[in-house]
Structures are given as C-alpha cells and as structure tokens.
Image (cartoon, rainbow, N blue to C red):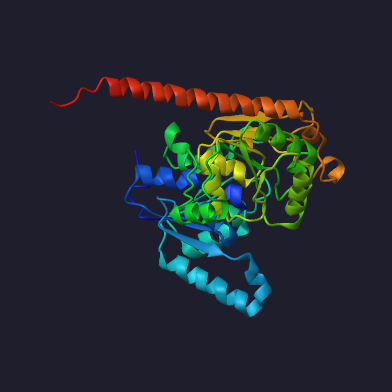
Amino acid sequence: MYDLFECTRRVLVIKLRHHGDVLLSSPVFQVLKNHYPHLEIDALIYQDTAAMLSRHPAINQIFFIDKNWKQQGNLALLQKEWRLAKQLKARRYDLVIHLTENWRGAWLARLLKPKYAVVRRYPKRRSSWWLHSFSHHYSAPGGNQRHMVEIHLDALRHLGLHPAQPERRLVLVPGLEAEQSLQAKTGVIEQPLIVIHPTSRWFFKCWNANKVAEVADHFANQGYLVALTAAPEAREMEMAERILSAVRLPVMDLAGQLTLKELAALIQQAKLLIGVDSAPMHMASALQTPTVALFGPSGEHEWGPWMNPARIITTRHTCRPCGQDGCGNSKVSDCLMEIEIDAVVKAAVELLSDDEGALRTHAKRMSIEMASIRPVS
C-alpha cells in the first residue's frame, strides 16, 4: 500500500482560530512525529495563540499571522503578508493540512503547491475553486457527535495514518520560565490548590457569578487554596469582580494577572479546575488536571474535556446544545444558569476523592516495592 508520508519531508498544519481550538490541534503534530520522525512539521496560527503551541516537541517552526496587521495600513499589511508568503514558499512543503474553513488555507494550498493538501468538507465551501485547491477531502459527522480532536485527526486517518489511543492526548508545555514567573507572583503554593476559571470570551457560556462565589467559599472552607482566574478583558474582569465581592472567605485573586503560560503552570499545580467551555478547560485536559466543566449552549461531545479525569455538568434542556448567543441572543443561557451549586460541588468532591485514592494506591504500591528491595551486602 502506498504511504504518502514516506515520501513527504515537510508538513504545514494551518489552524487559524482561538486559543482552545489551536490547543485541540496539538495531537496532530505529535502523531505525525511519532509515526514519521523524519518529518519537519510547521504550524501557521494567529500570533495571540502562540502560547498554545510554543515548546511543542514535535513542531519545527511556528509561523504567525498578527490580527493587528490590518490596523497598520494597506501597505504595511501587504508587506507583511508578502514576507510571510515568501517564508512559507521557501519551506517547500510536501503536505498542507488545513484544519478550518478559512479561505487563507485554500490560497496557501495554491500558492505553496504541495504534493498533497487535505481539508475537511464544509457545507459552506462547495465552490469549484475551493474544492480544487485541495487534493484530499474528508467528512466528519455533524450534530456535535464527534470530538474536535478526533475530527482533526481524521485528516491523518484519511491519508492512511491511524493514531493509537494514548497518542491522541493534547500537548501543552508551560516551560520553566513560566513556572518561575508564576512563583514570583504567587509565592510557593503549599495548600492543595483549586483553580476556578468562570469566564469565557463568549459570555453565553458563563455561569452565575453568585453561584461561583458559593462554590469558592465551600472549598475555601474545606482548607483548599482557591485561585480565581480570568482573561484581562473588561467583561471577564467585571465578572471576576462580582465574584470577589460575593465571596465570604479569602481566595487568591489572579484574574487578569497571568500570561497563558503562567496560567498553564498554575493549572498544572492544581488538584482541580472548575470552569466552563473555554481555553483553560482544554489546558487542564492537556496537563491532566481533573476538571469540572459546566456546559450549556455548546456541545460537550465536540468540545468537552479530553482524556483527563473530568465531570461534565449540564441541565436537561431539550434545546441544548443550540450554539446560540444566549436565550433570545441575550448572552444569558438558561440551561447554564439553572445548574445547581450542589451538582458542581458533588462532582468536584468526587474528582478530589478519586485523586486522593489514586495517590494512596500509588503510595501503598511504592511502600511495597521499597520493602521488597534488599540491601546489597
């Protein structure tokens, strides 16, 4: 059987989306490198999502598109686009893997002229020009039936590469620099840590601020150090302020204060993350941090926690997941607001108990192994 990867030297993977979406593409790079170590694999992403893939062990080079280029005038935009095109052209790619419906992927497939270019079939991309920009097209089921990680990996399956289950994990490397800068901001964290990230760039995915405060108080009362995080964006910071004004016990306020890499380092230390459908939830999956994820209008089958200990909390609204910008486009989703505090606390306690049980089992196994070692005379 013909193996196109054997005669491929350089691969470009294009993922022009938001932070969480980019992180969900990380297994594609690792699977390619695992099976074909000779490959040089590059990524093309937006500049602001760089932290999601930087330090990825399977990526050779990362090329960026800065969304701010448009604000610098048409001439500057043209110059930067031309420079990027020249850099990509010089790489002489044999394979382009385009993981979104962004028109740029089709333009680049035509400009770079790789031997092969693969893309998913999209209902809105049926023009002859789009279809003939790629050599391979693959289908994915609709209706929130398949996780986005698997949909990304379907691009490889379509080309004959079938990844094993363990290598489908997300890959995220916080890095020593981020760990050190985080410690400079927080000090040494000695208490068991729970991170609560209640916000998303899409506010229709957010829970009730007062309920978040109640959950934070519950675990602070149990002796956990609760850290509240949020992006440094006005609406997210406003929600964080509402939560902080409602809590009765002290929490660590890190809202708007961390870089993405520092947030990753914090989540890596945590016993648990509690949050909604947002990038930090995916970061927790990559870092194997147990997660309680609240889902409303978005679909957990497509976007939920991936291959880490997790509990997904939803309500039984027959209309979800609808993907709407809140009920009546109000940016407030009833299916999320009606989630009970007790359901979230119960799920969190279960995950914390499972983690403690695993630690006890590991300690017991280690003590048995140590006891069986005889000193050398």
Q: Residue at coordinates 76% horizontally, 44% vertically from top-left? A: 243
Front residue of 192 and 195: 192
- Taking the image as shown, residue 233 lies to the left or right of residue 333, namely left
* Furthest residue in direction left, as rendered: 377
- Taking the image as shown, residue 320 lies to the left or right of residue 263, namely right
Q: Residue 365, percent across and down?
A: 37, 21
Which picture quadrant has residue 341? top right
Front residue of 326 and 242: 242
Q: Compared to 371, does 199 lie above or below?
A: below
Q: Quadrant of the C terminus?
A: top left
Count of numbered circles on the image: 0
Q: Residue at coordinates 75% horizontally, 46% vertically from top-left? A: 244
Q: Residue at coordinates 61% horizontally, 45% vertically from top-left? A: 280
* Furthest residue in direction bottom, as rendered: 75
Q: Compared to 58, does 77 lie above or below?
A: below
Q: Residue 92, percent across and down?
A: 40, 63
Q: Quadrant of the N terminus?
A: top left
Front residue of 17 and 296: 296
Q: Residue 66, percent across and down?
A: 59, 66
Can residue 3 be seen? no
Q: Residue 158, percent across and down?
A: 48, 40
Can residue 214 be seen? yes
Front residue of 275 and 22: 275
Q: Residue at coordinates 40% horizontally, 25% vertically from top-left? A: 363
